[in-house]
Image (cartoon, rainbow, N blue to C red):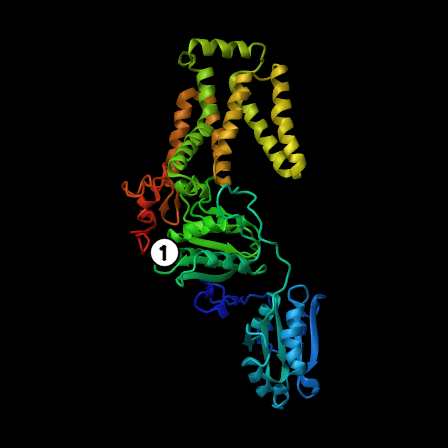
Amino acid sequence: MFKWHSAANNPSKGDDMFFKQRNKKNGPQETTTCEQKPDEKNLKLTTEALRSVLGENSDVTFKEIYINSNKDLRTTLLYVEGMINTKTVNDDILKPLIQESKLSEDRSLKGLIKLIEYGTVYHAAHKTRTAINDCINDVINGSAALIFDSESKAITFDVKGFEKRAITEPTSENVQKGAKDVFVETLRVNTATIRRRIKTPKLRIVQTIVGRQSMTAVAVVYIDGLTNNHLVDEVKKRLDNIQIDELNSPGHIEEYISDSRTTMFPQIAATERPDRFCSNIVSGMVGLIIDGLPTAYIVPATINQLMQAPEDYAHNYIVSSFVRSSRYFLMFLTLFFPGIYISVATFHHEMIPKDLALSIVAAKEGVPFPTFIEVLAMLFAFEILLEAGLRLPKTIGQALSIVGALILGEAAVAAKIVSPSVVIVVAITGIAGFTMPNLDFSNALRLWRLIIAVLSCIAGLFGLTIGSLILLFHYCTLESFGVPYLSPFVTADGKSWADTVFRLPLFLHKKRPEELHVTNKRRQK
């Protein structure tokens, strides 16, 4: 079982980096945060023991120090180069050890340790360690340790000083009107960004470790007394059940805590914007922040949440309602437009107006391929161009997109390989798909678009209808942490429709979403 640490209740425990593995059915087995030799957990906390574990690393430094130049009062300073702030170590730790007269009054190491613990060394964020594993974990995570061999003790000081990326503007979620800061790869910077926005003392940031080798810190964020306790417990339980060696990719967390692994649609909402993250936390959801990743996660995720953008609340509600309703229309357009065109042009000619039918026939003259092959080929070509644009460097990728969209499309029409109407249909379909606020949701729509197009090739509108029913059935079977994926359209009995297809005025958003079953349901009076 993981050992959870709440940075809200006790800040000194927020950085503890150790956990116990869940007991298995065949007997209790306990591991610590570091990969250990069989007898390592029995070692005493001494310099030699630490050298046997860390001494082979070229970036680990052991420095022997005489306190106040007294050879009888010796300690060893241990740290990892590149992980600490050298100036802080020099000014707040080494300087008082060498110059502070109080430290020379007590000739015993026990008394010396007491003086250091109670503030003779200037740095406030320190912990006394008696277990070698705890000391190693602190050092690996950016602390400097003073080791006292005769007492088998160490005092670790949090002096992290590694390089971190500055807070910049969002890159994947463009900001029109609102805050322009983003999450970065450093956990403590991200948690501080959240606390700047949510200042209630009930905000809980509970931290654990995932990954036996990477030992990645994962923070669960929620508001005590507001968020559903069952939801918080379920998130913690699923994190407890992750038994992997590393957590260095978003997929490592998404796949392991999602309800269903057989769906293309995201069941966890990802965002790089702290304002969006905090808004969902205040609504009663649970957030996840992973050390080393500039993306935060929000659970549960519903289709209504994935179709919303932060700018919906930054503009006038009439404008926002028009934009959001258009977004829903474009979702259906990008899904079904290719299938509808294939069905009508191939199987149901009688549905096309006479003038439009003549125009399509004239444009198709000389094209050797049937309509469904044209559409499928153009859809695949669109996916190839999109993937190529993503993989190439930004400057080349933009140029490739323009060349692919303009020159290749025009050349294909001029060479009578495809008809102009098919190019228009695929272009409208692709542009409509790019209006989705969530990239993962947009990718899922792209795949389902191909499935529905193939079914339309086989059976026309009947195939399109079958594909639509399969998709609807799939939506109805999906849940995210016990919340139906189609919420609030299928669960709220009309009580939470103020923030769905249309964004009604904010004074009507009096209650939080019903499907979350929050403890405090009222948002405003």
Measured from the top left, where is residue 262 in percent x and y?
Answer: 46, 41
Q: Which residue is mark 1?
A: 227
Instruction: Tell me which residue sits at (42%, 24%) in the image.
Output: 463
Please state if 467 lies on the left or on the right of 193 as rendered.
left
Measured from the top left, where is residue 282 in percent x and y?
Answer: 39, 53
| Res 400 visible | yes
Instruction: Tell me which residue sits at (41%, 37%) in the image.
Output: 320
- Work out whether residue 157 or residue 151 is closer to the camera in this orientation and state it: 157
Query: Which residue is farthest right?
Result: 58
337 in relation to 324, above or below: above
Amino acid type of disc 1?
Thr
- Work out whether residue 489 or residue 329 is closer to the camera in this orientation and state it: 329
Measured from the top left, where is residue 344 in percent x and y?
Answer: 44, 17
| Res 458 visible | no
Q: Secondary structure at mark 1?
A: loop
Instruction: Tell me which residue sits at (59%, 65%) in the image.
Output: 141
Disc 1 crowd rating (10 Å Cα; few below 14, some 14-19, many 20+) is many
391 in relation to 373, above or below: below
Q: Quadrant of residue 53?
A: bottom right
Instruction: Tell me which residue sits at (48%, 43%) in the image.
Output: 177
394 in relation to 29, above or below: above
- Work out whether residue 27 or residue 223 is closer to the camera in this orientation and state it: 223
Measured from the top left, where is residue 302 in percent x and y?
Answer: 40, 43
**Marker count (numbered):** 1
- Work out whether residue 62 or residue 25 is closer to the camera in this orientation and state it: 62
